[in-house]
Amino acid sequence: MRTSLRETIVAVCDAKVASKGEGVGLSFYAFFANKNDDPDLLLEAATWWIHTHRLDHFEKAVKIRQLVQSA
């Protein structure tokens, strides 16, 4: 996964946890605007989320942050 995507994921997870608490869940769509302006990056995130880690549609932000930071 490219560095810019990792940084975005961590930043979004940090913001969600700060605003809604440790139990907040999100999907990989949370890392993107409501338009598909970079399909390759979206596919990269989806592949990491679905194929590589076999995650559910919604996962806890703290879990996603930990996975990204430990990789």
Image (cartoon, grey):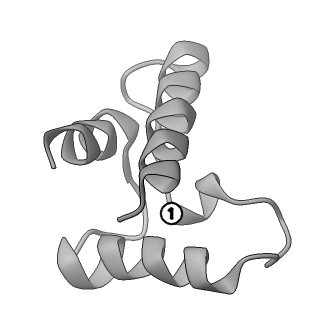
Residue 29 in which image quadrant = bottom right
Residue 50 in which image quadrant = bottom left
Taking the image as shown, residue 71 lies to the left or right of residue 48, namely left
Q: In x, y percent, where is residue 41?
A: 58, 74
Q: In x, y percent, where is residue 64?
A: 31, 46
Taking the image as shown, residue 32 lies to the left or right of residue 56, namely right
**Rendered view: 2 above or below 49:** above
**Rendered view: 37 above or below 8:** below
Q: Residue at x 27, y 46 (%)?
A: 68
Name the residue beneath numbered marker 1.
28
Q: How many marks?
A: 1
Q: Residue at x 50, y 60 (%)?
A: 27
Q: Along the line of sight, which residue is nearer the eye, 17 or 42? A: 42
Q: Along the line of sight, which residue is nearer the eye, 19 or 15? A: 15
Q: In x, y percent, where is residue 30?
A: 62, 54
Q: In x, y percent, where is residue 66?
A: 22, 37
